Every structure is written in C-alpha cells, then in structure tokens.
Image (cartoon, grey):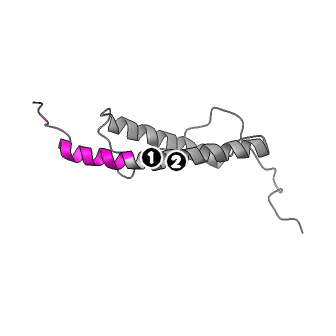
Amino acid sequence: MSDHTKGEPIGLRIVWMLLFLFVWQLAELLLAGVVLLQLIYRLVYGAPNAGLLSFGDSLSQYLAQIGRFGTFNSEAKPWPFADWPAPRPPQGEALHSVPPGDDEPKP
C-alpha cells in the first residue's frame, strides 16, 4: 500500500476527477462550436477572427489542464481553482482586420 503523505485523499481526488470529466464534456462541445464559427468566419471574411482565436487557444489550454489533472500528471486543479489560461500569440494565418472607419454606421 502506498503512503499518501502529500495531496488529497484518493476519494476526494476521484470526486474532482469526475467533476472535471463532466466539465471536459461541456468544454469539448464549446470548442467544437468555436471551431465551426471560426471556419465560417474564415470562409466569409478570408481570415480568422481574433476573439475566436484567443478564446479557442485559452479553451484548448484549459482542456489540456483538465487532461493533466485527470491523468495524475498534475496536482493543480484547473479553473476555477487556478487562473484561466492566457491565450498565446497566434501562429497561423493573419487575422481579419476592419479598416478604420468601416465599422461606423453610414448616414
């Protein structure tokens, strides 16, 4: 039998893992929606949306944190017990930009 001198009792860890498994399922659906929205945006405007890029990257990192916690690679619980992951700079296509003045309503 192993000595559990650090960390939570295994029973509590199981509860957290089950809770985060449920959160994973919801976040996975949300990420699928972001992927579809980004694809539609890219088809319409010819470039990705900056907001969707940032949120999609943060959400992807969050899913990775859940995976690391659930597979015992990390003792750190993901958000809301830790900060939400900050988006990294995009490494793909150039973003869609609106020229100055084009977002203002015409009289």
Image vertical order of residue 2 relative to residue 100, above or below: above
Tell whether 107 sits left or right of 57.
right
Q: Say which quadrant the N terminus sits in.
A: top left
Query: What residue is shown at x 38% (from left), y 53% (from top)?
Result: 80
Q: Is residue 42 inside the magenta stretch?
A: no
Determine which quarter of the picture holds residue 13. top left
- Dot 1 crowding, Cα within 10 Å, few <14, some 14–19, many 20+: few
Q: Is residue 8 inside the magenta stretch?
A: yes
Is label 1 in a helix, a strand or a loop?
helix
Q: Position of residue 43 (x, y in %)?
A: 76, 42
State if disc 2 and disc 1 touch (CB < 8 Å). Answer: yes
**Amino acid of disc 2:** Leu
Query: What residue is shown at x 39% (from left), y 37% (from top)?
Result: 67
| Nearest to the observer: residue 6 or residue 70 | 70
**Amino acid of disc 1:** Gln
Image vertical order of residue 65 relative to residue 105, above or below: above
Q: Position of residue 31 (x, y in %)?
A: 54, 45
Query: What residue is shown at x 32% (from left), y 35% (from top)?
Result: 74
Q: Say which quadrant the C terminus sits in.
A: bottom right
Determine which residue is flagged by label 2.
Answer: 29
State the mark number for residue 90: none
Tell whether 94 sits left or right of 102.
left
Query: What residue is shown at x 83% (from left), y 65% (from top)?
Result: 105
Determine which residue is flagged by label 1.
Answer: 25
In magenta, the rendered stretch is: 1-21
